Structures are given as C-alpha cells and as structure tokens.
Amino acid sequence: MKLYFKLACMLVTFAVCLFLTAGPALVLAQDALHPDPNPAQDQDAGSGVQATEPNATDSGGQEVSGGGMIGPDYKLGPEDVISLTVFNLPEMTQTIRVENDGTITVKLLGRVKVAGLTTSQLRDELQKELGKTYLEDPHVTVFIKQFHSTPISVVGAVAKPGLYQLPGPRTLIQVIAMAGGINLPGTAAGNMQGGAPAGRWAYITRREGFADLMPVDGISKLAPDQVKVDLGRLLYSHDSALDIPVKPFDTITVSKAGVVYVVGDVQRSGGFTLEDVDSLTALQALSLAQGCSASCNMKHDEIIHTLPNGTRQVSYINLGKIMKGKANDPVLTANDMLVVPGSMVKGIGSSSIGTALSTVSGLIIWRGL
C-alpha cells in the first residue's frame, strides 16, 4: 500500500514539473500562431503627427502620375482634396474638397482660406487657431489625397499627350519629360501610337500672357499669349534661358515634324522628315533620296506645293542646271513633293500629278502621319 502511495506521489510531482516547464512554451507557440489582432500601440513612439517634409507621406511623399513626387512647396488650390486629422481627437478627422473660392470648412473654426498655402503652412495655421480657444497644444496633420488645382496640357509629338498636374515648380524640359519625352524618328513609342516624330518647335500658350518673359535667342513671341521655343537648342544646347518655367493652365504643344517627299526615277523615293529644320532645298531632298538613277531626267523636274487653301501649285525646275550652279536651288517646305521623271519623259505634266500624289498618299498611310 505504501509502495502504491509513493508511486502516485512521484507521478503527481512529475506532472506538475512538466506543466511548469512546457506551459510557457505552449503559450508562446499559441501567441505566434494566433497573434493579437489589436496590439497595444506604444504611446511613446511619437506624437502621431505626420510631418510635412519632402519625404513624408502627406505632401512630399505622394506619388504623382508622370510628375515624380509632390514637393513641400506645392500650394493648395480649388478642387484639391485634403484630409485633416487632430491627434487623439478622431471626431475632428475630415476629408474636404477645396471650394472654388479657395476655402474649406473646418470643424470648430468654420471657413478657412487655404488657397496659396502649402500643407506645412496650413497645418501651422490650424494648430494656431485651434489652440487659441478650443484645444491645448493641438497636433494637426494635413494630407493631400487628390490634387486638381494646377492642370497643364501637353499635346503634339510626345509619347503620352494629355492633361497633367503640376506638383510644384516645373520647367519646360521637366514637363516634356512628364509626358514621356518627345517622339523620335523610328522609336517604338512613335510607331506604336502612329505619331510623327517631333519637329523643331515647342509652342506654349498662356492665358495671362508673357509680359515678363525676357527676349532670348531661340524663343520667339508669336502673340501676347503664345511663344515658340527651338526644341533642338532647348534639348541639346544646355541653354537654361530656353528652359522657361511652366505655369498652371499652360498648354504645351510639341510640333510634329514636317515631311518632304521625293518620287520618281530616284534611288530611294519616299518621305523625309524635317526633324530640326523647317525646309530643305531641292538638292538636299535629292541627296536624301540617294540621288537620281541612271535613267532619270535632270531637265524637266517639278516641285508640287500644296497651298493653305488646298490647291496645288507646280513649279518646273532643272536639276541639271542647279547642280552646276547655273540656277537657284529652290526651297521645299513641309508636304512639298519633288518629282524626278525618267529620261523617256520630257515632263510629268498635269495628268501625271494624280499618280504622284497617290504614291505620296500611300507613303503617308505607311508612315502613320
């Protein structure tokens, strides 16, 4: 009997020791498998205020489509949507759209003027006003959820034409980069979109005009509200005077390159892009076509020019005399066509213009212009 009693005591003692040893491990394992869905927050981790610095998430950390990150100098304006929170006062949280008059309605404060303020300035202003009467040492966070107050339009020969928002001060080169850059001859982007390569000029239209724009070589003022900038010099000369600031509501139009056509008895007929020039001479166009073939007629050649009203004007030239310096080398502009007939033809004549034009039409369709 005493033996059974001793064995029972030993078993009880062993069970108690096993429980004391394995119990904490089992609890830890259970916690790992089923973590607390609402863990307690560390109250000393910070004030809960989101800073409005460039690397924060309320202004500078917001990603902007096509424009990088919203900088801390972004100024609020009509149609922007902002979120306001006050630390430890969830009932003060608001998501508000800025009205057309540049104001918002804030709980306890009523109408507040915000247009023209950065998020940091608005945060400081709200903290000051709330601290005057209602709250002691309030901590306010301002978060830009959507911004719509600084639109610009980028159209023409760019990879991604469309409407963009200025997240802060931007120059002409930066805005063109936002739109994916200019179309280049033979680029996949240009071919996929069916768009022509960029031409020589970028046009900027500004509704308040350019009264404060300093004259500089490479920028021409076409009208009080429009200027054109030489794209080649802008992109490749590194002249900062051409990289003018872009303002909200500006329209930037990147011109499409014109095309000069050479058809007839030449080595390589086709359309040739006026990339960084506005015109070519007849001999320059002929050289792009790799010259005449052995059977071409160098005496009865033609330039077909389309007038603004749609009518066609034919000029007769003598490439042989031009090459010898005995005649002026005429200028071809966008959509002009140089026709070089074969030696068996004394002149293309008006009856053959339709044939040449149909050839050009096929080239246009092929090029996607």
Image (cartoon, rainbow, N blue to C red):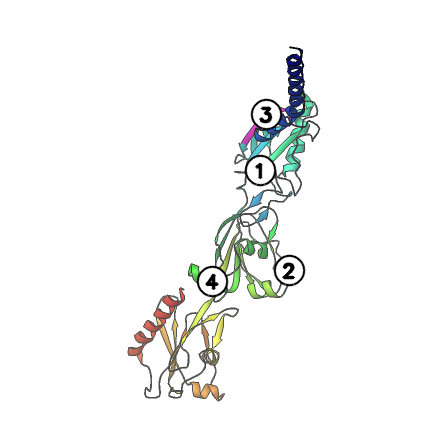
| Of the two numbered discs 4 and 2 in the rendering, the one whose residue sits closer to the viewer | 4
Q: Which residue position holds label 4?
A: 188
CB atoms of marks 3 and 2 within 8 Å = no
In the drawing, does residue 203 fall left or right of residue 25? left
Residue 279 visible to the viewer: yes
User: Residue 158, position in %: x, y?
Assistant: 49, 58
CB atoms of marks 4 and 3 within 8 Å = no
User: Residue 313, position in %: x, y?
Assistant: 37, 74
Q: Which residue position holds label 1?
A: 144
Q: CA separation, marks 4 and 2?
A: 31 Å
First of labels 2, 1 by sequence position: 1
Q: What's the residue type where badge 4 is placed?
A: Ala
First of labels 3, 1 by sequence position: 3
Q: Main secondary structure of the magenta part?
A: strand
- Dot 4 lies on which element? helix
Magenta segment range? Answer: 87-95
Residue at the extreme top? 1
At x 56%, y 46%, the residue is 64
Quarter the C terminus occupies:
bottom left
Residue 143: image quadrant is top right
Q: Which residue position holds label 3?
A: 92
In the drawing, does residue 142 fall left or right of residue 153? right
First of labels 3, 2 by sequence position: 3
Q: Residues within 10 Å of mark 3 (few under 14, many from 20)?
A: some
Residue at the extreme left? 351
First of labels 1, 4 by sequence position: 1
Q: Is residue 48 magenta?
A: no
* Above or below: residue 213 compared with residue 145: below
Q: Which residue position holds label 2?
A: 241
Q: What's the residue type where badge 3 is placed?
A: Met
Residue 134 visible to the viewer: no
